[in-house]
Image: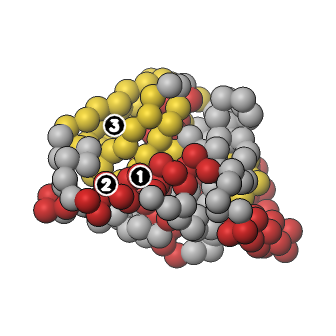
Amino acid sequence: MSVLTIRTLPDPVLRSKTSQVAKARFGSIGLQRLIDSMHETMDAVSGVGLAGPQVGIGQAIFVFNLDERRGHVINPAIETWGDAVQDTREGCLSVPELYFTPSRALHAKVTGVDVNGDEVEYEGEGLFARMLQHEVDHLDGYLFVDRLADEQFRQARRAMASADFAETTKRINAERAAETSSTFGAGSAFGAVASSGEV
């Protein structure tokens, strides 16, 4: 296992739709190593989720660790229902130190397969549902800032175009690169430092 480099804006891999993981890879040592490395990377930055594109992998896979549930999903399909809520801050490891409240469905369910090709299903509400939606968005080439509307959308665009954001991204990337052997970049998304990290 190894800690992987987390890609940040404006890396084009973050805006590219992923490919499905081929069935021939299920059960392989290489796929297991990738999943293990993604978990290690997510843990190193105190994240709650991490998707393939965030580590330069253009394939449909994400890992997570939230609400005492830890796992991974390959080739996921998502279903959402319930009221759209906009009451929780989100952040993203690939969009350093920007936090907003995009609208997300209250409930979500993801189905897919695990490293061995066996079917898996994860369902939740609130923060867990938000995480599932956030990670599947990554696999479709979307970032959480793309879900913003009105003034938040304009604020995000201004922030991401600023020299301050460019400097922040440069600093965060340097810190992560310098400290890959220890915990680094710990931070909060969704506004709850003790219970969640960036995804």
What is the distance, in whole Å, between disc 2 and disc 3 at their CAs? 20 Å
Which amino acid type is marked by label 3?
Val
Which amino acid type is marked by label 2?
Gln
Left or right of residue 76, residue 175 in this image: right
Residue 14 in sight here? yes
**Where does residue 113 sit, x and y in percent of width and height?**
23, 44
**Where does residue 133 sit, x and y in percent of width and height?**
46, 41
Instruction: Say above or below: 88 vs 177.
Output: above
Q: Quarter-wise, where is residue 81 in the image?
A: top left
How would you rate the neighbour count of disc 1 (Cα within 10 Å): few for under 14, some for 14-19, many for 20 or more? some
- Mark 1 vs mark 3: give the one in front: 1
Q: Nearer the viewer, residue 185 or 103?
A: 185
Q: Which mark is residue 32?
A: 2
Q: Earlier in the sequence, mark 2 or mark 3?
A: 2
Residue drawn at (57%, 67%) of the image: 5
**Where does residue 91 sit, x and y in percent of width and height?**
67, 47
Q: Which residue is mark 3?
A: 110
Q: Nearer the viewer, residue 133 or 150?
A: 133
Q: Which residue is mark 1?
A: 36
Residue lying furthest right in this view? 164
Which amino acid type is marked by label 1?
Asp
- For the residues bearing labels 2 and 1, Cβ distance under 8 angstroms: yes
Q: Element at badge 2?
A: helix
Residue drawn at (31%, 54%) of the image: 32
Instruction: Say above or below: 174 vs 129.
Output: below
Q: Nearer the viewer, residue 14 or 85?
A: 14
How would you rate the neighbour count of disc 3 (Cα within 10 Å): few for under 14, some for 14-19, many for 20 or more? many
Q: Element at badge 1?
A: helix
What is the distance, in whole Å, between disc 1 and disc 3 at their CAs? 20 Å
Residue drawn at (66%, 29%) of the image: 195
What is the distance, in whole Å, between disc 2 and disc 1 at their CAs? 6 Å
